[in-house]
Image (cartoon, grey):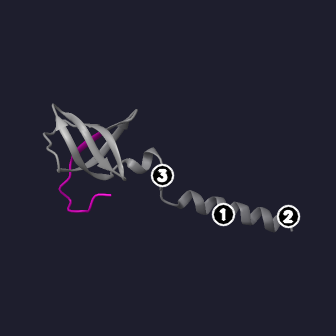
Amino acid sequence: MSLAFSLLVLRLALASRRRAVVSGREEMLGALGRVLDWENGSGHVFTHSERWRAVSHAPLAPGDRVRTLAIHDLTLTVTPDESGDPPS
């Protein structure tokens, strides 16, 4: 009985490692969003139903679609998105 329980727990643990990330920092990378306001290379974007502070080297304007490249502290680094996927 103990062996069967141990094997079940091991199987569930291995299955959970294969699942895609659904929360946290890693899930934000590649996320789509929209620019809310932008001035001098920084502003705010709306992604995952939240307002985030963001920076970008590309010129952006309110309403532009962006994709998250990196996160540093609570600031996203974004780039313009041309993929056509709907933002989250």
Q: Magenta region: which residues?
A: 77-88
The crowd level at tag 2 (other Cα within 10 Å; few <14, some 14-19, many 20+) is few
The kind of secondary structure element at disc 3 is loop
The residues bearing labels 3 and 1 have C-alpha atoms spaced at a distance of: 19 Å
The kind of secondary structure element at disc 2 is helix
The kind of residue on which mark 1 rests is Leu
Characterize the magenta stretch by its predominant secondary structure: loop
Relative depth, front residue between 21 and 55 = 55
The kind of residue on which mark 2 rests is Ser
The kind of secondary structure element at disc 1 is helix
Percent position of residue 1, x then y: 86, 68
Q: Which mark is residue 12?
A: 1
Relative placement, left or right, of 23 versus 45 is right
Q: Residue at the location (22% across, 37% down)?
A: 56
Percent position of residue 64, x then y: 17, 50
Q: Which mark is residue 1?
A: none
Percent position of residue 45, x then y: 27, 44
Q: Residue at the location (22% across, 45% down)?
A: 36
The residues bearing labels 2 and 3 have C-alpha atoms spaced at a distance of: 33 Å
Sequence-wise first label, 2 or 1? 2
The residues bearing labels 2 and 1 have C-alpha atoms spaced at a distance of: 15 Å
Sequence-wise first label, 2 or 3? 2
Q: What residue is disc 3 on?
A: 23
In reply to whether residue 8 is colored magenta, the answer given is no
The kind of residue on which mark 3 rests is Ser
Q: What residue is disc 2 on?
A: 2
Where 4 falls versus 26 (above or below)? Answer: below
The crowd level at tag 3 (other Cα within 10 Å; few <14, some 14-19, many 20+) is few
Q: Residue at the location (33% across, 58% down)?
A: 88
